[in-house]
Image (cartoon, rainbow, N blue to C red):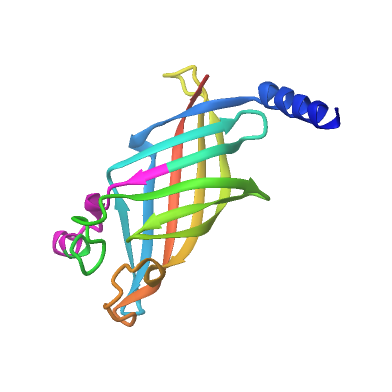
């Protein structure tokens, strides 16, 4: 009887939750990274092609679920030769690994936990979550929300440039995902 009561309470709480889907505005959303070059300069890059699916709690302004799929062939570091090199088998090997994905597994203490799949490797990654706010513009009566996710990984853990010296391209890579969009039911 206690199990049935607990299940009913959980179902009611879930049904009453203020969840909405998040419609991502790709024009103002960026999936980026920063890595050291020769230990002295930051190289910034981003991925132009991505799919992002988010379920969001309007009341406490937190994600319920996040799924991101990125096409590594869309990498952009503002250097065409470097971008071509990054898509080869030396780094992202885009002919073999067509996508990079992240799927949230839990949200706790302003941290988003999930599995990052890249370079044929799946590992848990923890992102710091920051809700940046909400605004309604003159052009749209629909509230626009923004939030950021930031983390750091080691590229060698994911076989990215595994034969490339870390004194040329650093092992530590900062990840940033800045998202803006609207909510719908």
Position of residue 130 in the picture relative to residue 4 (left or right)? left
Classify residue 127 by image quadrant: bottom right
Position of residue 82 in the picture relative to residue 180 (left or right)? left
| Residue 28 in the image: above or below residue 40 | above
Q: Where residue 81 sits in the image (x, y, percent)?
A: 13, 63
Residue nearer the viewer, 134 or 116:
116
Q: Residue furthest front?
A: 1
Residue nearer the viewer, 112 or 118:
118
Q: Where residue 22 sits in the image (x, y, percent)?
A: 48, 29
Query: Looking at the image, which residue is at 54% across and 38% down?
Result: 65
Q: Quadrant of the N terminus?
A: top right
* Residue 72 located within the stretch drawn in magenta: yes
Q: Where residue 64 sits in the image (x, y, percent)?
A: 58, 36
Q: Where residue 33 sits in the image (x, y, percent)?
A: 37, 58
* Residue 52 located within the stretch drawn in magenta: no
| Residue 56 in the image: above or below residue 117 | above
Q: How many marks?
A: 0
Q: Which residues are the magenta region?
A: 68-84
């Amino acid at each position: 009887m206690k199990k049935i009561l607990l299940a009913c309470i959980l179902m009611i709480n879930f049904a009453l939750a203020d969840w909405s889907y998040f419609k991502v505005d790709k024009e103002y959303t960026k999936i980026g990274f920063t890595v050291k070059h020769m230990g002295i300069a930051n190289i910034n890059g981003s991925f132009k092609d991505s799919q992002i699916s988010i379920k969001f709690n309007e009341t406490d302004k937190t994600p319920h679920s996040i799924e991101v799929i990125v096409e590594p062939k869309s990498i952009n570091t503002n250097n065409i030769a470097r971008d071509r090199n990054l898509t080869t088998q030396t780094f992202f090997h885009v002919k073999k690994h067509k996508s990079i994905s992240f799927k949230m597994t839990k949200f706790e203490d302003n941290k988003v936990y999930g599995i990052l799949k890249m370079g044929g490797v799946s590992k848990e990654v923890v992102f710091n979550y920051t809700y940046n706010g909400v605004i309604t513009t003159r052009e749209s009566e629909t509230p626009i929300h923004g939030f950021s996710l930031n983390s750091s990984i080691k590229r060698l853990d994911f076989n990215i440039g595994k034969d490339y010296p870390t004194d040329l391209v650093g092992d530590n890579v900062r990840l940033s995902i800045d998202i803006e969009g609207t909510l719908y039911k």
